[in-house]
Amino acid sequence: MTLRVLLVEDDRELCRTLKDAMTAEGYEVFTAASLSEAFALMTGLGARPTAGGAPVDMVLLDLGLPDGDGEQLLVELRRKHAVPLIVISARESDGQKVRLLDAGADDYLVKPFSIRELLARMRVGLRHRGTSVSPAITRYAVGALSIDLGTREVLLAGEQVHLTPTEFNLLARLVRSAGQVVTHRQLLMDVWGAEFTEHTHYLRLYMAQLRGKLEDNPADPQLLMNEPGVGYRIVEPQG
């Protein structure tokens, strides 16, 4: 199951860094750079708000936004929803931290913070709401191949392999479930989007391209395996 996160952050560089880190962990990330954009995204009713038409499992919220204070979004969310929410802010005032936690924030993380700490706190917040999340595989090695999802680096026999963004995203999705079959539908949904779940020819094309770049003999793959009629898997990593 892919968990969806709404990241409300107006610092473009930080937003990109956080999005890349969360994507490597297997989250689907929606971003908003202002209060108005966040409110526009979170149009859902019911038990969970939505972003882009999909239920959101967690919100990461900056406070100093160009069109207002992020606290406004927190207050509005807590009127209707119990979605886990972590405040990420440069403001260090104990009084403000206490006020926002009392207002319904699940956690408050002061900038600058480490990505590892943020991801750990996200897992705690989700676990408190009944969703168990384990740290995702971010490094993979088998034979001469090594993959680092965090840096998006793929090495084969020590040489860097150039992958297109879609090729890398497909490979990363398989790595995050290394040793397990991922269905055609799940791969299409996670890599291309929900509207592409019937486009299995995309998978055939991109898997052929990946095998051409990563397999010793693409016609007899030993790494990227096909389970006919079901999906694909990448072999379990070494060690």
Image (cartoon, rainbow, N blue to C red):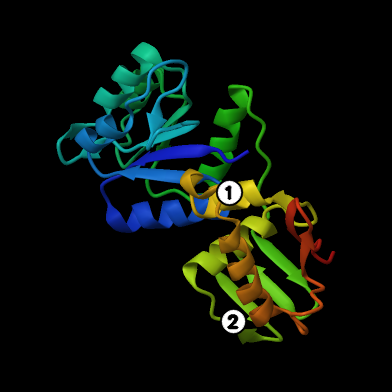
The percent position of residue 168, horizontal first and vertical second, equals: 56, 67
- Find numbered disc 1 in the image and state the secondary structure of the residue it sits on: loop
Q: Nearer the viewer, residue 118 or 171?
A: 171
Residue 219, image quadrant = bottom right
The outermost residue toward the left is 67
Residue under the point 33% across and 23% down:
74
Q: Which mark is residue 63?
A: none
Residue 149, image quadrant = bottom right
The residue indicated by pointer 2 is: 161
Left or right of 120 in this view: 226: right
The outermost residue toward the top is 79
Can the viewer see residue 206 in this picture?
Answer: yes
Residue under the point 81% across and 61% down:
236
Quarter of the image for the N terminus: give it: top right
Q: CA distance from mark 1 to mark 2?
A: 22 Å
Characterize the local packing of mark 1: few (<14), some (14-19) or many (20 or more) Cα atoms within 10 angstroms. many
The residue indicated by pointer 1 is: 26
User: The disc labelled 1 sits on which kind of residue?
Assistant: Gly
